[in-house]
Amino acid sequence: MSKTFLFYDLETSGLDKAFDQVMQFAAIRTDASLNELERYEYPVAITKDIIPSARAMITHGQPLLTEGPGESEVIPKIRHLLCQPYTWHGGFNTLSFDDEFLRYSFYRQLLDPYRHQYADHCNRFDVLPMVVMYHAFAPDVMHWPMIDNVVSYKLEHLNAENKWVSGQAHDAMVDVSATIAVAKALLQQQ
């Protein structure tokens, strides 16, 4: 069985992994050359006991769904995608936020919160540290956005500066597509 990469992103009701929830999940599965194989997009209805953060709602601009599939239906689907054998999963800043957020979500659904990280030849990755490394050692790989005379490593700034993907930043599928564009730029200069 060959390795695939599952690039994913979450939009959430806030930053507190213990008390907030996933509101939108998007992922694109690629082969080792980053050619798209499949797409997944799951909106998640808000649980009745969650009060979304105003800052989160302003940042991602996602509608607050009160009907449709909730966490109990969507989280097992997400875990299934991440746990497919030989899947390397990650995205942009996933190790610091998304991955930990999902572990709490899996735990709330009584699912093993760590299996996706090690079982069946699965593994994790994060593009953000690679971007920082390329900026230091191979700066010609892309255009670097300057915000207040400082290089910005934010995905939305990198995407806008390099004009890779159109669409609203902080829409999960737009961010996944932009992350793959960043990865392809890095892959061109090894």
Image (cartoon, rainbow, N blue to C red):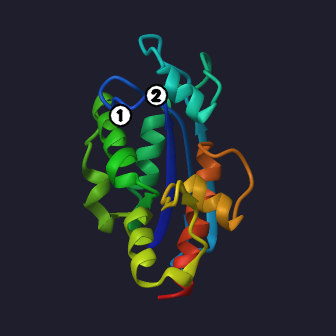
- How dense is the environment of label 1, judged by Cα within 10 Å: few (below 14), some, or many (20 and up)? many
Element class at badge 1: helix
Judging depth in this view, the residue of 87 and 145 nearest the camera is: 145
Residue located farthest toward the top when viewing the structure as drawn: 48
Measuring 59% from the left and 76% from the top, which residue is drawn there? Answer: 142
Q: Are marks 1 and 2 in contact (CB under 8 Å)?
A: yes
What amino acid does circle 2 point to? Glu
**Label annotation for residue 71:** 2
User: Residue 147, how many percent across, how many down?
Assistant: 55, 55
Measuring 37% from the left and 66% from the top, which residue is drawn there? Answer: 129
In the image, residue 18 above or below residue 137: above
- How dense is the environment of label 2, judged by Cα within 10 Å: few (below 14), some, or many (20 and up)? many
User: Residue 40, how many percent across, how many down?
Assistant: 60, 50
Look at the image and tell me whether residue 99 can be seen. Answer: yes
Specify whether 147 is left or right of 167. left
Q: Marks 1 and 2, Cα distance to the nearest angstrom?
A: 8 Å
User: Residue 43, how many percent across, how many down?
Assistant: 60, 34
Q: Which residue is mark 1?
A: 105
What amino acid does circle 1 point to? Ser
Specify whether 98 is left or right of 55. left
